[in-house]
Image: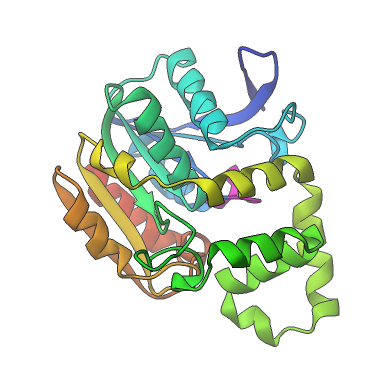
């Protein structure tokens, strides 16, 4: 087990596996952990150096929970990790919230340490409005919805999110869902989760996308669940760098864990290994 000590003394759990001509840092999503990438890393580590870690308040970094961290906080953590491990010419891969961390990193620190970026199934702006329909819940989550959700108990908010990400859970009786969902939440610091969820909803990273100066690949699900597949075209129209989109057919937001073999294969293609 390895821990990276942040400048404030708190520690992030991380794993550094494999070797090869390419280095990739993989960032997980909200309420998830580095375990999301365990199978892909197993398949990639003979070809590339793979670094995975837990964001503060999550799993092995659960006790890194001081203050009210926001998305900028996670981007600064990422920058400390990159500098602390003396990384350069890296590929940053972010799935879901992890992609939001990547965009915040680009906005705050630029792309000088990066070789390429892979964003996985994430919108630059969660709140939908009259002009933006590519946000959370495939265009059906507004500021009014966010305000209503904030008044609910946290478990109810999380349950809605999970069903949005994995639609088949709608058919599972609530009493059967409760135990596994509660188990996942027990691995995280609830205050951190709330703070990060609020931060994501407040953000508009569309300008950050235009600040990307390295090749960008977008992995997306078809038909998708939380986010619209149409985001693939939006990214293409709004970047000024070489761009490629990779579709994961018959998939939901959870395509990383639904099809880790294809995920690893497509990642290897992007890395050129």
Q: Is residue 7 left or right of residue 46?
A: right
169 versus 158 height, above or below: below
Residue 177 visible somewhere in the drawing:
yes
Question: Residue 106 lies in magenta, yes or no?
Answer: no
> At which x and y percent is residue 171?
69, 87
Q: How is the image coloured?
A: rainbow
Residue 189 visible somewhere in the drawing:
no
> At which x and y percent is residue 255?
46, 65
Q: Using the rendered view, name the quadrant where residue 179 is placed.
A: bottom right
User: In the rendered picture of this protein, how many numbered marks are placed on residues?
Assistant: 0
Report the magenta residues as a range. Answer: 30-37
> At which x and y percent is residue 262?
37, 62
Q: Is residue 263 left or right of residue 37?
A: left
220 versus 79 height, above or below: below
Front residue of 19/260: it is 260
Q: Residue at x 27, y 62 (%)?
A: 232
For the C terminus, the quadrant is top left
Residue that extends furthest to the bottom in the rendered view of this protein: 171
Q: Residue at x 74, y 36 (%)?
A: 62
Front residue of 204/188: it is 204
267 versus 212 height, above or below: below
Q: Residue at x 66, y 51 (%)?
A: 31
60 versus 164 height, above or below: above
Q: Using the rendered view, name the quadrant where residue 246 is placed.
A: bottom left
Front residue of 196/96: it is 196
For the N terminus, the quadrant is top right
> At which x and y percent is residue 40?
45, 51
């Amino acid at each position: 087990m390895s821990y990276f000590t942040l400048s404030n003394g708190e520690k992030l759990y991380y794993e550094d596996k494999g070797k090869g001509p390419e280095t990739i840092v993989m960032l997980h999503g909200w309420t998830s952990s580095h375990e999301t990438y365990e199978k892909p890393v197993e398949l990639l580590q003979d070809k590339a150096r793979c670094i995975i870690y837990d964001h503060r308040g999550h799993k092995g970094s659960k006790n890194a929970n001081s203050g009210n961290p926001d998305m900028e906080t996670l981007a600064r953590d990422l920058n400390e990790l990159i500098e602390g491990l003396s990384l350069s010419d890296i590929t940053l891969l972010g799935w879901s919230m992890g992609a939001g961390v990547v965009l915040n990193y680009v906005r705050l620190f630029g792309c000088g340490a990066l070789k390429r970026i892979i964003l996985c199934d994430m919108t630059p702006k969660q709140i939908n409005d009259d002009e933006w329909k590519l946000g959370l819940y495939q265009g059906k989550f507004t500021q009014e919805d966010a305000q209503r959700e904030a008044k609910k108990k946290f478990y109810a908010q999380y349950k809605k999110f999970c069903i949005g990400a994995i639609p088949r859970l709608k058919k599972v009786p609530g009493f059967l869902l409760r135990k596994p969902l509660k188990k996942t939440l027990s691995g995280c610091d609830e205050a951190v989760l709330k703070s990060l969820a609020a931060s994501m909803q407040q953000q508009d990273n569309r300008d950050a996308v235009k600040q990307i100066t390295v090749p960008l690949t977008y992995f997306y699900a078809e038909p998708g669940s939380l986010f619209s597949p149409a985001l693939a075209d939006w990214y293409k129209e709004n970047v000024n760098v070489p761009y490629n989109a990779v579709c994961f057919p018959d998939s939901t937001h959870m395509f990383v864990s639904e099809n880790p073999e294809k995920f690893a294969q497509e990642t290897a293609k992007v890395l050129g290994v």
